[in-house]
Amino acid sequence: MAIFKGSGVALVTPMHNDGSVDFDKLKELTEWHVAQGTDAIIACGTTGEASTLDDEEHIAVIEAVVKQVNGRIPVIGGTGSNNTQHGIHLSTEAERVGADALLVVTPYYNKATKKSLIAHYEAICSQVSIPVILYSVASRTGMNLDAATVAELKKIPNVQGIKEASGDISQIVEIARLVDENFALYSGNDDQVLPLLSVGGSGVISTIANIAPKQTSDMVHNYLSGSFEAAKETQLSQLPLIHAIFSEVNPVPVKAAVALLGKCDLSYRLPLGAPEEDTIDTLKREMTAYGIL
């Protein structure tokens, strides 16, 4: 059974101008997403700048979102690491503070073998009782989760889905062939949501949902309910905005877009920094054209 169906937002982490986490804005942003119909919130993923949060901040962000949501929609904590023991620590702490599920990216930099990769996930999953969503994004990690490996990993009882961000439609289709209806397939690419849904996907873990939450959720639910033309119209109409929010490395442009909506400050932690002025201009233009600014 899918942990959620629809649009799960890969939430940005609001920060003050000094780089500290802005928990007030985080709570406001969380509440806005619930009101807008977002189907799940992913805290401390790639878009949430998890890589520059220390462990205390990481868990505090997840806990703040959990408390604000208060059971209304699932909260999924990003807890992946290239250090298995660190991944276990983050995962058990996220479960302790109330996360409903975990998003666990493949180890990065280490270049694990398939055998040790499976052992890595087995070790983490053995220490938690909540569902785990695999996260495959080789463009960042250097490690692809191919279909055969996913089929092996799904044998771990609490591995219940994958965020598939390879961009490889052929691989996605093969994964869909090898899994069953109890394994949730989520698009990790905003421009490939409908192709993934067409082979049995459950939804998207979305970046664009940070600024277009209702539209993104409606698109998925329209498709799942058979309103294919309405879903297609949304998917195609979002493409210029999707290109804009990925015109620099994520989450730089999308956080700027959230700031343009007045929902966070334009603040990042190095090595990430503010976007170019041309990027801001493009965001303003495309957000206005899409009707959200």
Image (cartoon, grey):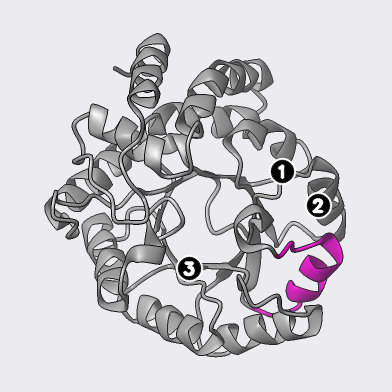
Residue 261 location in percent, x, y?
Answer: 24, 28
Q: Are marks 1 and 2 in contact (CB under 8 Å)?
A: no
Question: Which of the pair 222/42 is nearer the observer?
Answer: 42
In the drawing, what numbered circle is on residue 101?
3
Which residue in the rendered view is the most extreme toward the top? 289
Mark 2 vs 3, N-terminal side = 3
Mark 1 vs 2, N-terminal side = 1
Picture quadrant where residue 44 is located? bottom left
Residue visible at 41% across and 65% down in the picture:
51
Mark 3 vs 1, N-terminal side = 3
Question: Which quadrant would the N terminus be assigned to in this image?
Answer: bottom right
Q: CA distance from mark 3 to mark 1?
A: 24 Å
In the drawing, what numbered circle is on residue 157?
none
Three-letter residue code for mark 3: Ala
Q: Are marks 2 and 3 in contact (CB under 8 Å)?
A: no
**Could you tell me which secondary element the residue under label 3 belongs to?**
strand
Three-letter residue code for mark 2: Ala
Q: Which residue is mark 1?
A: 167
**240 w.r.t. 102: above or below:** above
Residue 199 location in percent, x, y?
Answer: 79, 41
Q: Which residue is mark 2?
A: 176
What's the magenta region?
143-157
Which class describes the residues within 10 Å of circle 3: few (<14), some (14-19), or many (20+)? many
